[in-house]
Image: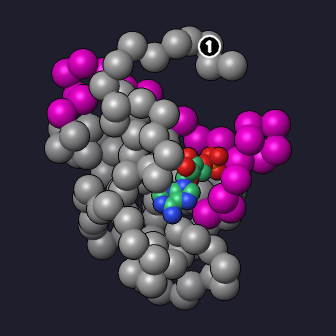
């Protein structure tokens, strides 16, 4: 799996920086967000470095299958949850390795700020 230099999420995939992993498949990793915004706040990423939605292609299927699975593992499947992908500066994207936030465990405001 090629690692992109200085990409935090590539380092998590490689294991060179730690993360609390919740689910791992051949192509996808789900781990806890380090600064959780809800009782359950997970990040689902492709293990391969994909910068944005244009590059996601068929990995999208694997990602959403992993998200569905992890919602059961995390116990938020019946109470509900939100999936968020921030792309670009107006959305406040900080890390340029595509990631889907999975938020749950409390009532979530809509629309977000
Ligand atoms: P975004 O603003 O959509 O790019 O979100 C990046 C997310 O990555 C934020 O919610 C951060 O709290 C989270 N994050 C940054 N570094 C780490 C890390 N080392 N482990 C887990 N989550 C992280
Ligand atoms: Zn990366």
Element marked by disc 1: loop
Counting from the top left corner in percent of width and height, residue 10 is at 53, 75
Position of the C terminus by quadrant: top right
- Residue sitting at x 36%, y 57%: 31
Magenta stretch: give its range.
75-97
Q: Is residue 11 rendered to the left or right of residue 70?
A: right
Is residue 87 among what the camera can see?
no
**Residue 50 location (% of width, % of height):** 61, 67
Q: Report the side of 109 relative to 94 (left or right).
A: left
Q: Residue at x 62, y 13 (%)?
A: 111
Is 88 included in the stretch rendered in magenta?
Answer: yes
| Percent position of residue 46, x then y | 47, 64
- Judged from this view, the residue extending furthest toward the right is 89
Of residues 54 and 44, the one nearer the viewer is 44
Q: Is residue 10 above or below residue 85?
A: below
Residue 63: x %, y % from top left: 40, 53
Q: Is residue 72 visible?
A: yes
Q: Which residue lies at the image location 53% right of the left edge and 68% below the top edge? A: 9
- Outermost front residue: 35
Q: Residues within 10 Å of mark 1 (few under 14, many from 20)?
A: few
Q: Residue at x 82, y 44 (%)?
A: 89
In this figure, which residue is indicated by the disc labeled 1?
111
Residue 101 is covered by the magenta coloring: no
Query: For this rendering, which residue is in front, 46 or 113?
Result: 113
User: On the rendered structure, is 42 left or right of 112?
Assistant: left
Q: Is residue 20 above or below residue 32?
A: below
User: Is the residue at mark 1 in contact range of ligand 1, meaning its CB lies under 8 Å from it?
Assistant: no
């Amino acid at each position: 799996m090629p690692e992109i230099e200085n990409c935090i999420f590539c380092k998590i995939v490689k294991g060179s920086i730690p993360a609390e992993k919740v689910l791992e498949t051949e192509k996808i990793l789900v781990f806890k967000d380090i600064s959780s915004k809800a009782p359950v706040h997970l990040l689902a990423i492709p293990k391969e470095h994909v910068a944005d939605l244009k590059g996601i292609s068929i990995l999208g299927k694997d990602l959403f299958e992993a998200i569905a699975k992890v919602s059961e593992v995390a116990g938020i499947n019946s109470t509900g949850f939100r999936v968020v992908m921030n792309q670009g500066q107006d959305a406040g994207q900080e890390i340029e390795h595509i990631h889907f936030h999975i938020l749950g465990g409390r009532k979530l405001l809509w629309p977000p700020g």
